[in-house]
Image (spheres, rainbow, N blue to C red):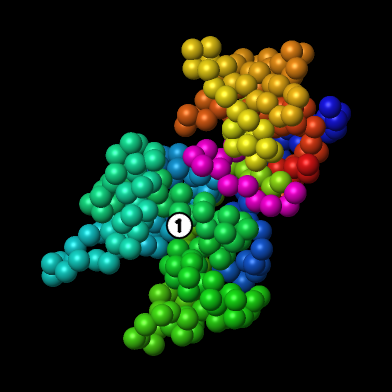
Amino acid sequence: MKKFIGMALAAVISASSFTALAAGAIPDHQGTSMDGIEIGTAQLNSAVKSYYDLFEQAGDQYGVDPNLLAAICMQESSGRNLSYRDDGSEYPAWGIMQIENTLEKSFAKFGEDTTGEKWTLQDRLDPTKAVPFAAYLISQSLIRYDCDYMKMIQSYNFGQTVLDRIIAAKGDDWLSERVNAAQYATNWPYNTYGDAQYIEHVMRYYHNDIDYIGAKVRIDGKLLAFDDQYPLLETIDGETYTMIPVRGISEALNAKVDWDGDKQEITVKKGGDKVVMYLDSDVAYINDTPITLDAPATLMNNRTMVPLRFVMEAFNVTVDWNGDTRTVEITK
């Protein structure tokens, strides 16, 4: 096993550095510069603030800054559960996150995957369903755009197809081309398309009111997607540890994971090596040799979370922590 070098670089972040990270705007943003974008110049209303707990829970689960969820909600609906206008006509998108009719199948499948029930379009009016779905969509966009929040935000308004066409045509100059988005939409009869200033309109509502404890993982430079629980920064006894879903990271490193519910036992096998750990225990076994984890293995959203140090010791990989982007960098 490779020696674990520098806990501050990999598994542990001091509480003070964690606070400093949280003070910046969208701490895990990478890519298109936010220079010139006004941030936090407008206030959120009480309706949006009433959903802070939902934004925090969904953001932590899907690796999305909950403050951004709040900002998008404010721009989209001002926290109102929109469905029908006063004249009786139907809005093209419903709910506080303004989920469009075109997402009917995706919304139904998400409900089935997460709750066992297919959600209907009417369920968009339930914030406890709309917010997690929006966070999930955003997490997928972040993977698509390699954690470039600027592209992700604009795609929430334009849709990925139109934005991708603009990026393909203009490259790094895509921001200035947003005003011509109608030219990139198929069979679009109007001169304008969407909100060409959507990023600017959203970011004016971005505030650091909600603690964001999410983190990202890259393996050999590639951003890793997780199904239903992203890594988190968890503070225990004054130290902040990067907690990672063991199944997601193990399978990404070509290991096999088995779960024994009766024993509350997780077994990970790769090649001739075997790792065994137990829920709520800070002791794991690598080829029958006990090691002490920095924090106990714990269950979050039906996923077993383990400290980052485990990844290095169990899989013989190099692990670094990029505090500027809250990213775990793993090299095979």
Q: Main structural element of the magenta stretch: helix, strand or loop? A: loop
> Could you say where residue 53 lies in the image, as x and y percent from the top left?
41, 40
**Can residue 242 be seen in the rendering of this structure?**
no
Q: Secondary structure at mark 1?
A: helix
Viewer-proximal residue, 149 or 268?
268
- Residue 133, given in percent of the width and then of the height, sits at 40, 49
Asked if one can make out residue 218 in the rendered structure from this viewpoint, the answer is: yes
Within the magenta stretch, is there residue 195? no
Q: Is residue 163 above or below residue 303?
A: below
Magenta-tinted stretch: 220-235
**In the current view of this chain or complex, which residue is farthest to the front?**
272
What residue is at 45 percent from the left and 54 percent from the top? 137
Say which of 155 and 52 sits in front: 155
Task: Identify the amino acid type marked 1.
Answer: Ala
Residue located at (63% from left, 47% from top): 224
Task: Give percent across and percent down for residue 270.
Answer: 71, 29
